[in-house]
Image (cartoon, grey):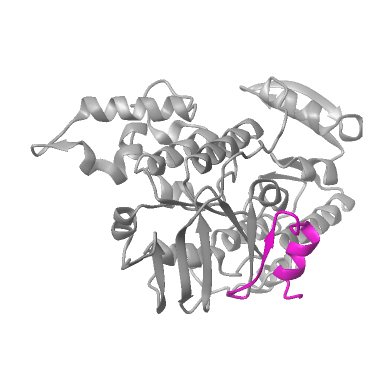
Amino acid sequence: MRKKVTFAFEQLGVTIDLDKEIGNLSVGQQQMVEIAKSFLSDLKILIMDEPTAALTERKTERLFSVIAGLKAQGVGIIYISHRMEEIFKITDCVTVMRDGLVIDTKKTKETNVDELVRKMVGRSITDYYPQKNAEIREIVFEAENLSTADFKNISFSVRSGEILGFAGLMGAGRTEVMRAIFGIDKLKSGTIKINGKSLTINNPAQAIKAGIGFLTEDRKDEGLVLDFSIKDNITLPSTKDFIHHGLFDDKTATTFVKQLSERLNVKATDEEQMVGSLSGGNQQKVVLAKWIGIAPKVLILDEPTRGVDVGAKREIYQLMNELAERGVPIIMISSDLPEILGVADRIAVMHEGKIAGFLNKKEATQENVMQLATGGK
């Protein structure tokens, strides 16, 4: 069995310790393990649901070559994805579903992105990445020489109204930097400042008190309590704001949650609905509402549109723009290169635990990002 697993990993181009517990792997590594597992049986049909959601560009390309090999062997593949470029790259025909119904099936070469998006959301979407009108002003957040075992001497700043993107290959250290800033993992050295004031952050509670919000890459295990209601999830980090004379003010909390849910267009029966019963896009909106509810001084978004549909993605981009227009600095990690190029004002590219360089909007191309991400100059 170990030989079979090793061979599957080799096919996918990944190196993972076979004896390591799954819980200690990154989300991207867990995704590769799940994909490798499916290769161990005698395949006739392989169903893949958002397989590249946690993968880097390089790992995605490796997966596509494996898919091509399986296809050549006669394996039928059902490939579920919201990433349009993937649909047009590897599929022969495409079926669009909406609200539990099949809307249309076509040969891929006989359709286009605009037509698919229109059928997916039931309307035409213009400006997939909405125009950003926020004024970029003074520096609000600063990280100076942050270091742990996973990254070294990370320094960057984010200005009021700015969206700073973080790009890099899997394992480059992007998520680890943000977890340390939020106090989940302990920093060995370095300084964090908000509005010029140095902060002591040893745990998430201190980060929240300082005004830092953090949407993690794994919403189901780290961002939400799935058997709690929408209201309970949204008010979790701001519970103290609803306690008066030792009692929880449920009426005020309900009004607060309703307003946020309407603002983010969360589709649910009411604020008491269990989060676990919501779609991926609506779950992500609940996590965003939770952090918007603390009125953050800086907001960190790790893969904010992972596993959500095209319509919900655009709503999230629009929300990010609205927050930026209000002066909130946003740090966004994304493995989706078109997304980070379309949304970020500036991009920090990481390689092997260090920032390899920064790219402004004019300099930022897929080629330039990948050159820095792979250690090029």
* 368 within the magenta span: yes
* 220 within the magenta span: no
Q: Residue at x 75, y 51 (%)?
A: 43
Q: Residue furthest left?
A: 245
Residue 180 at x, y = what percent?
A: 42, 67
Q: Residue at x 18, y 31 (%)?
A: 249
**Closer to the camera, 234 or 259?**
259
On the image, which quarter does residue 367 sit in? Answer: bottom right
Q: Quadrant of the C terminus?
A: bottom right
Residue 23 visible in the displayed image: no
The reply, left or right, for residue 258 in relation to residue 176 is left
Residue 57 at x, y = what percent?
A: 73, 59
The reply, left or right, for residue 151 in relation to residue 80 is left
Residue 191 at x, y = what percent?
A: 40, 73
Residue 58 visible in the displayed image: yes
Residue 21 at x, y = what percent?
A: 48, 68
Q: Residue at x 85, y 56 (%)?
A: 69
Q: Residue at x 71, y 22 (%)?
A: 102
The reply, left or right, for residue 116 in relation to residue 191 is right
Total labels drawn: 0
Q: Which residues are magenta?
A: 352-377
Q: Quadrant of the N terminus?
A: bottom right
Above or below, 126 against 149 in this view is: above
Above or below, 4 against 46 in this view is: below
**Closer to the camera, 292 or 311?**
292
